[in-house]
Amino acid sequence: MYLILDAHEDLSINMMEYHRDYRLSSREIQAIDAKNGVDKVWPPSLLGWEDWNRGRVGVVFSTMFEAPSRHDDQHIDTNKGYKSIQQANARYWRHPALYKRLAEENPENFRLIQTQSELKSHLQEWESQIPDQPETFKPIGLIQLMEGAEGILGPDELPLWWQAGVRVIGLAWAGNQYCGGTHMPGPLTKAGRDLVKAMAEIGFVLDIAHLDEESDWDVLDLYNGPIIASHANASSLVKGYQGNRLLSDAVIQALIERNGVIGIVPGNCFLDMTRSETSDKSEFPLSLVVDQFDHICQLAGDADHVGFGTDFDGGFGVTGVPEGIESIADLPKVLTGLAEHGYSDAALQQMASGNFLRVIESVLPA
């Protein structure tokens, strides 16, 4: 089996808001959620330490996410969201402390990765991991990704976030003072342009997932560092697609030309919008995910610009993913589908983890 890197998982917010213990398996977490009533307000978990290991998902871009308060029907509970930039900043600073504590207190389960040497050592350790032999299970490597830059007060604060271990920054979740975002169109603002320039000087990876397309083009024109879309499917394949959340083929082609990588989301709401969110899993075949990978490979003419960006535990759960996926352990089934399309072992390894590793290795300090 191939080592997999997942470029987007919402761990810390689930730990804080729903007290999920990711040292457990996804089934154990689901049982605890049901006992505590979490299943009434949040979808059942797809993640857990055993599941990561069984799927050979050895590296994760673990997000730092906080929801803004928005007075519309497109965003989550306005009573829970932050209501000022200062409040956002205070909430975002909870996340690196949580990840640091998680790794320090559970070194057999989790490991923070902030340098090239740490990543190299981690990958070498995973060479001896065998998915069906629990005695070989390894810690999960965590690389911090900030989702939504409203946690940053301004360019002068960026060095502090780098020191805290953040290596990837996504400017948007919804639109904000820096850019247009999901359901809130618009370009980069003056503050956004200043932030992007400062990010390049330090060396962050810039994540365009959730950016409005007008902001996408601004970033692609302005940013001279590495760019990814950590979790954003091709809109051209999604039946009934409306909105500004997914990527047009034009933006995908531009990302490819910049040597970027797109993380595919195996979430039903990202695969077919003509069906209800309550539709049975059987109505969403795994081939929809395979098609997303293949589409980007066809646009690129190679397999060097696509990977996994599951967004698991970020708003959909077991009932919201295609048939055949019950947890993160089932991601290798996507690679099996791609192999059946004729992709070589080398191409499959690139899509499993090599492409995102290439990008993140380019910014990690020695």
Image (spheres, helix red, strand yellow):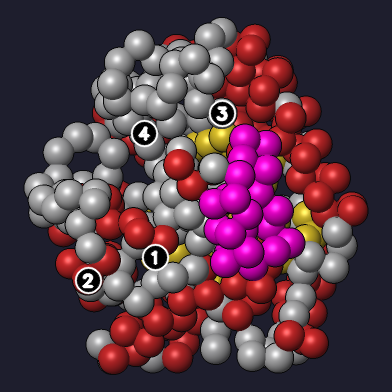
Dot placed on the residue nearer the N-terminal end, 4 or 1: 4
Q: Which residue is mark 1?
A: 306
Q: Residues within 10 Å of mark 4 (few under 14, many from 20)?
A: many
Q: Is residue 215 left or right of residue 39?
A: left
The residues tagged by marks 4 and 3 sit, at their Cα atoms, a distance apart of 16 Å
Q: Residue at x 30, y 72 (%)?
A: 323
* Quarter containing the C terminus: bottom right
Q: Residue at x 82, y 45 (%)?
A: 100
Nearer to us: label 3 or label 2: 2
Q: Residues within 10 Å of mark 3 (few under 14, many from 20)?
A: many
Nearer to us: label 2 or label 4: 2
**In the image, residue 182 above or below residue 208:** above
Residues rendered magenta in the picture: 16-36
Amino acid type of the residue tagged 4 in the rendering: Leu
Residue 250 in sight in this render: no
Q: In the figure, residue 167 lies in which quadrant?
A: top right
Q: In the figure, residue 335 lies in which quadrant?
A: bottom left
The residues tagged by marks 3 and 2 sit, at their Cα atoms, a distance apart of 33 Å
- Nearer to the camera, 278 or 257: 278
Query: Could you say which disc has been placed on residue 211 in the image?
Result: 4
The residues tagged by marks 3 and 1 sit, at their Cα atoms, a distance apart of 26 Å
